[in-house]
Amino acid sequence: MTKARETRVMTGGKDLNMLLAVGRKRLGDAHFTHAMELIEHGSASISPPRALDIYSRLHHLTEEEMRALKNRVLVAYAKRAGAEEQLATFVGINGDVDWDITATVFQRLRKRLKGRRNVELRRWVELHSGRTEAELLSIHAENVIRLYGSLGDLSPVADAVRLYMETMAIRNTLHEALAIATADRLFREHAAVAVSLPAKRAAQATGESGRRTRGKRTQDDDAIVALGYE
């Protein structure tokens, strides 16, 4: 991205901020939905704070994201319980397990759940984490496409991906996957438009031809009139 374009986008203010705010909202909603699934599915084996801690570590939530997610979960539990004074027992997040931040998602998952007897739960969490990461990547790609549209069609897709990752503080390990997912979606959209345009033009041409034919009196029409059939 040229320095001038980057400066214009970063200082352009409202449009960029609105795009990013909507993107954060969509990610926050997805995190809440999947975190609640994990908490509820594992409720018989692990406490809600421990399940939330597992979720946040598996999906690389920042402190700010974790705080926002915890607050939403607390509010959801408060509404179910109908008694806010009971929330104090759920505020603390157990951070007694120190994970290797260089490990992969599934390596951290196995380390976090190592020694648990519930093999079925461990497998469910592993599969659930994969599904969650796939959905989050899809949301990231949609956010990048919206940002790409605001930069102009002539801007490289790589510029939009880089700007999005830097602004949203996305971990570097997602860069290649996000760039591929974004380019794939844009290609599919472009291909769909390229296929639909000729069909639309053909339909318009057929309609115009039909209107011209209906509006023109032919020799056959004159013959029908002469024979008295009209």
Image (cartoon, helix red, strand yellow):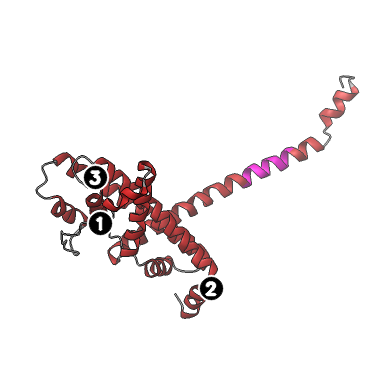
Q: Residue at x 27, y 49 (%)?
A: 130
Magenta-highlighted residues:
201-210
Image marks 2 and 3: residues in contact by CB distance under 8 Å: no
Local packing at callout 3 (Cα closer than 10 Å; few below 14, some 14-19, many 20+) is: few
| x then y, percent, for residue 180 | 35, 59
Relative to 16, say whether 88 is above or below: above
Q: Whole-Å distance between the Cαs marked 3 and 1?
A: 27 Å
Instruction: Report the amino acid beneath label 3.
Output: Leu
From the viewer's perspective, is 213 left or right of 8? Answer: right
Whether residue 180 is visible to the viewer of this picture, yes or no, is: yes
Q: Are marks 1 and 2 in contact (CB under 8 Å)?
A: no
Q: Residues within 10 Å of mark 1 (few under 14, many from 20)?
A: few
In terms of depth relative to the viewer, which is nearer, 154 or 144? 144
Q: Is residue 25 above or below residue 228?
A: below
Give percent across and percent down for residue 88.
29, 53
In this rendered view, identify the residue nearer to me: 4 or 224: 4
Is residue 208 inside the magenta stretch? yes
Q: Quadrant of the N terminus?
A: bottom left
Q: Is label 3 or label 1 in front?
A: 1
Q: Which mark is on residue 92?
A: 1
The quarter of the image holding the C terminus is top right
| Residue underneath mark 3 | 127
Residue matched to label 2? 12
Q: What type is the residue that disc 1 sits on?
A: Gly
Between discs 1 and 2, the one toward the N terminus: 2
